[in-house]
Image: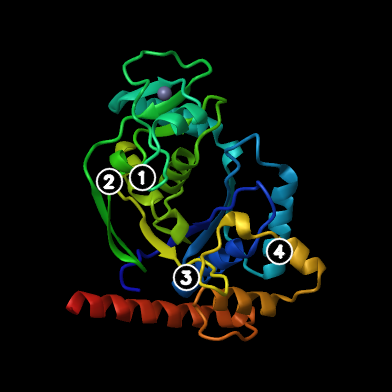
């Protein structure tokens, strides 16, 4: 695709809060396929920022599962090893942006401020309360403008994070770095120039791009949001629906080729099911991206 930066740097970034499931496999295929197709590098980033929910045994398991899948990576990082870096970046942010402390629990916010779309929206309750840091969360005020980007698959997107989620939580009341903050700091400092992830994370993008700007990253990454896995009735599967882990599927005797084929078919990337070998993934990714590019160009011409 002509809009990828070369040398391409992308990442596969699972959270070790459970075992890998088919949604992860689809994302790993896309990351691996695009990176290898364009001679890029893959960072395997273990996103264990939530200390209560992450467990080392899940990290061991995900490394094993990835090896079994045969999708190798080039570099490795773990968010829990990067505490000092997040602290430095938070300090830097405090110098240039309005950062404040927040005492609200998730329940407080749920009771006061659900958006019609169902997303949790923070109304800025604690801004100007001048709370100290101890036992409180840390938030940054979001600019009120809208931000646009050209998603490599979905095309032009416009988002207004100040209306979608309100001021972003950077660290929670228990001292855990949040997904958005840790992810943006890492994408920035690890020089990731293409973020490849599922459509379920599309809404995160505008706010993450704003965070990149606030952290003075001159090169926000490009974004590619791929389709999710559908069940037979056309309903998108969410993380919660994946009751069986890859680990369990392996123990029941599934082979890699059948798994790849089923995953690609259920995401609409393969038109019909057939077993797929690792060696075929590059060509399947290439054909898929070519089709998408054609579709985007046709839309522009209309
Ligand atoms: Zn608050």
> Could you tell me which quadrant the C terminus lies in?
bottom left
Residue at image x 30%, y 28%? 97
Determine the image quadrant of residue 38.
bottom left
**Relative side of 113 to 73, left or right:** left
User: Label 1 crowding class (10 Å Cα cut-off): few <14, some 14-19, many 20+?
Assistant: few
Percent across and percent down for residue 301 are 18, 79
Q: Work out whether 102 lies above or below 218.
A: above
Residue that numbered label 2 is attached to = 160
Q: Which mark is residue 116?
A: 1
Q: Do callouts 3 and 2 mark residues in contact (Cβ within 8 Å)?
A: no
Q: Which mark is residue 246?
A: 4
C-alpha separation, residue under disc 2 versus residue under disc 1: 15 Å
Sequence-wise, which precedes: disc 3 or disc 2?
Answer: 3
Residue that numbered label 3 is attached to = 34
Which of 188 and 7 lies nearest the eye of the viewer? 188
Q: Do callouts 3 and 1 mark residues in contact (Cβ within 8 Å)?
A: no
C-alpha separation, residue under disc 3 versus residue under disc 2: 29 Å
Percent across and percent down for residue 52 are 65, 34
C-alpha separation, residue under disc 3 versus residue under disc 1: 36 Å
Sequence-wise, which precedes: disc 3 or disc 4?
Answer: 3
Percent across and percent down for residue 200 are 46, 57
Mark 2 against mark 1, which lies toward the viewer?
1
Sequence-wise, which precedes: disc 2 or disc 1?
Answer: 1
Which of 16 and 87 lies nearest the eye of the viewer? 16
C-alpha separation, residue under disc 4 versus residue under disc 1: 35 Å
* Figure quadrant, ligand 1: top left
Q: Do callouts 4 and 1 mark residues in contact (Cβ within 8 Å)?
A: no
């Amino acid at each position: 695709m002509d809009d990828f930066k070369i040398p391409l740097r992308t990442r596969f970034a699972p959270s070790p809060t459970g075992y890998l499931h088919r949604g992860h496999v689809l994302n790993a295929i896309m990351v691996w396929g695009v990176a290898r197709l364009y001679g890029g590098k893959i960072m395997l980033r273990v996103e264990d920022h939530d200390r209560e929910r992450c467990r080392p045994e899940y990290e061991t398991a995900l490394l094993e599962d990835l090896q079994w899948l045969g999708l190798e990576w080039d570099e490795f990082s773990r968010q829990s090893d990067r505490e000092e870096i997040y602290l430095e970046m938070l300090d830097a942010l405090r110098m240039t942006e309005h950062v404040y402390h927040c005492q609200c629990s998730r329940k407080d916010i749920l009771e006061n401020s659900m958006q019609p779309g169902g997303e949790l929206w923070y109304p800025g309750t604690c801004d100007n309360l001048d709370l100290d840091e101890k036992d409180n969360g840390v938030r940054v005020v979001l600019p009120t403008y809208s931000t646009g980007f050209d998603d490599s698959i979905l095309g032009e997107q416009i988002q207004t994070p100040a209306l979608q989620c309100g001021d972003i939580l950077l660290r929670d009341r228990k001292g855990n770095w949040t997904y958005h903050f840790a992810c943006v700091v890492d994408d920035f400092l690890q020089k990731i120039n293409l973020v490849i992830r599922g459509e379920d994370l599309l809404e995160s993008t505008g706010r993450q791009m704003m965070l990149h700007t606030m952290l003075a990253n001159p090169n926000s990454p490009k974004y590619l949001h791929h389709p999710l896995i559908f069940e037979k009735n056309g309903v998108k599967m969410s993380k919660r629906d994946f009751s069986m882990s890859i680990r369990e599927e392996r123990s029941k005797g599934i082979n890699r080729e059948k798994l790849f084929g089923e995953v690609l078919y259920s995401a609409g990337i393969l038109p019909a099911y057939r077993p797929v070998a690792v060696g075929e993934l590059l060509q399947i990714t290439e054909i898929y991206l070519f089709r998408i590019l054609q579709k985007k160009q046709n839309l522009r011409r209309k």
